[in-house]
Every structure is written in structure tokens, then in C-alpha cells.
Amino acid sequence: RIGSITPCRYTPGTLEYVSFIRGNAGWSHHQGPSLYQYSDGRLIMLWAAYDIDECNNDNVMLYSISEDSGERWSDPEVFMAAPGANVSHAFQVQLRGTDKVIMVNRESHFVGEIHDPVTKRHLKTADYARSASRIILRKSLDLGSTWNFGNELLYEQIVPHHRPPFYGAPEAFLQLQSGELLMAVCFLPPDQREPQHYHVAFLRSEDEGETWERTHILTVPEERGAMEPTIVELEPDELYCVLRNKSGYLYETMSLDGGRSWSAPEKTSIPSPEAICKLLKLQSGRVILIWNNQSSTTQRPRYPLVVAFSDDRCKNWSKPRVIATESGANQLSNFGVIQLSDGRILLGISHYHATPPTTSDIDLAIFDEEWILKGEEG
């Protein structure tokens, strides 16, 4: 038994914040939660678990299920593992009007990562330029209860003029109002592996994920390029995307044709370190943005964690409200977010503790639109 999950209550108009699972429950680190709700009401959280370093080739993906809108959760169990590989970046989409669910995830074999298993200290970061990734698409015909073995997305569909190894990951996956699927993949082009300069490829499928067409590639000029896109559909085929980067501010780009083409990315006035952010369109039509509200050209500090809303199609944002904060080299990042049918918003957060030997918890914040609207950063 890995552990048990503390019940997570929801009180309308307030913020509840709990430790979902702590580091050293089975593995020293729990990271990268993603949340999805099936049409039968079941809510699933998927996340990676590993020891010492996120590039450990002996990690697993865990899952927990809630059948009461995220208040009580099943004990975590292993959802996925791959011998000699690292599994991560899992996203699911249930095709509207069906019981069919499409899942995409990454498998990577990292090269060059070194850690001391005795002191549990990370000594050397993996060499992404020599590490190899696969992007796997799987299908379920019974609302995620069982899955097929899946198929690998061909590298040539993502990277022009591909030369192995391929290193990249799916970062956004959604079904548009038209029914087509849209995927955004962050990758290192063959000629920009050293130094690293990431690009984002957008792919569309019109046949439920059977075939894919790459429609657009973009990047930004800053060191390391464009990373971890997050996308919302504002109106049919009108898409808004925000990009992680090293400028100290988030970048944004728009598509008016369902992801076939995108505007040149522009730097916003939204301060951010080099860290993930998330967009979510609410049932009301407002869009929320969740991010670390601190300008930095490095990956620190990854706090405070804040939320702001836009009611004018992402042109302007409200004053952010603090969800949680930290200090020193600790982090609140690598999160996933969902709004349920009753309006509550669940935010799964990777909570990194930097004091050696390092650990990572997953925290769960539960709030709603009322709480966002009535608050200010404090």
C-alpha cells in the first residue's frame, strides 16, 4: 500500500488547501498532477512518482479516483510504468457523445543523469540533447477502465527534417468545439539541441486521433525558446495560448482557425519565472490563469502561486489572488487544474521541498469562481 489520501472538503466561496500525498509515500517525489473527469462523474488524478530526480529512468505513474467530486479519493495505485524509461505528461480527452477516451503520454530514456543513491542527492542533470522520447497515443472504449497498447506518434509528424534522437513532450491536448483534436508538443529541433532552444508544434486530428497533421511550429527568441504551452478555446476555432520562457514574462499567441495557424508570439506584461502556467475556461465564459507571479529569467522563485481572471477574451487580467506561497528554494509548480460541474475548481500542485534529501508532495487546492472574484492578492 502506497498511502491514503486525506479527504478534501469543498466550501463554496472559500479556498481549501490540503496535502494530497506527501513525499516519501512510496517514492521521495510526487510530481506533475493532471486531472480529468469522465462523463459518469468519476474524477481521476494522474501523476509521476520517482526517487531523487525527475529524470530517473525508474519512475512510475500513479492514479487515484474520486467518485464524489474530489472530496474522497481511492488509495493511489500504479497506473503506468515502462522498463528503463520515465513515464510522464499524461493527458486525456473523452470524445463528446461517446465512451471513447484518447490518452497521450510521453516515455523517455534519459542519458547523463547522475545521483547518489546513499545520500539521495542529485549530482548531474540529464543531457536532453542525447535523451530519447516517445509520444504514445492510447484509446479506451469504456471511459478509461481499460486501454489498448497504443501507437507511437511518428517523429516526422512533429519535427521537420528529423534526426534521432527525438526529445519532446505533449503539453496540451483538447477537443475543439468542432470535434477535432488539437495537440501541442514541445520539442528540441535537431539543429538546436546544444544550446537548447525549444519549439512548439501544433498537430490536429479530424478522425479521433487516428491520423495527425502538423499545422504550425513556433518559438520565441529568448534562451531555451518556447516551452509548456497552455491553450483555451475562447469561441469556436478562436484559441488563446500562453508560453513558458526565460524572458521574465509570459508570451502569448492566438489562432483564429482552430490551430491551423498562429500569430507571432508576443511578450505580455505578466511577470513569471521560467515555469509552467495554466489557462482554464470556466463555465461562466471567464478564463482564469494560474502561474507563479514573480519575474525571473531563471526557474526560481516558483512562488507565489496565484490566479487571475479575464472577462474580455484574455486581453486584460484581474489583480491576482494568492493561492499559496513558499520561501527559499522550495517550489509550487507543475500543476493541473479542472472545473467540475458544480463549479468547484480543483488545482493539483507539485510542492517541492529543497532541504536535502529533497522531497515533493502533491497539494490540492479547492476553490471556485466566487472566491477568485472577491479576492485580491494579499
Image (cartoon, helix red, strand yellow):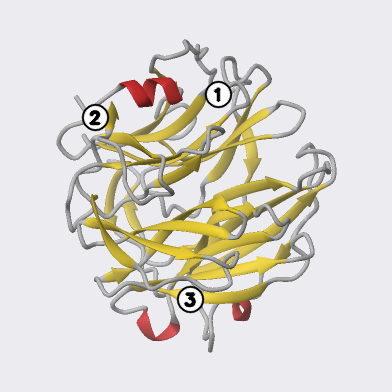
Q: Earlier in the sequence, mark 3 or mark 2?
A: 3
Residue at x 44%, y 49% (from the top left corner)? 313
Q: Amino acid at mark 1?
A: Gly
In the image, residue 256 sits, relative to residue 172, either above or below, namely below
The residue under label 3 is 217
Residue 113: image quadrant is bottom left
Q: Secondary structure at mark 1?
A: loop
Q: Earlier in the sequence, mark 3 or mark 1?
A: 3
The residue under label 1 is 343
Q: Measured from the top left, where is residue 278 in percent x and y?
A: 42, 45
The residue under label 2 is 325
Q: From mark 3 to mark 2, how far is it between C-alphas? A: 35 Å
Comparing 323 with 62, the one in front is: 323
Q: Amino acid at mark 2?
A: Thr
Residue at x 55%, y 31% (from the top left corner)? 339
Q: Nearer the viewer, mark 3 or mark 1?
A: 1
In the picture, the quarter occupied by the C terminus is: top left
Q: Are marks 3 and 1 in contact (CB under 8 Å)?
A: no
Q: Measured from the top left, where is residue 140 in percent x and y?
A: 80, 47
Q: Measured from the top left, where is residue 155 in percent x and y?
A: 60, 76
Residue at x 68%, y 59% (from the top left corner)? 181
Residue at x 21%, y 30% (from the top left corner)? 326
Q: From mark 1 to mark 2, how far is it between C-alphas? A: 24 Å
One can see residue 303 in this view: yes
Q: Amino acid at mark 3?
A: Ile
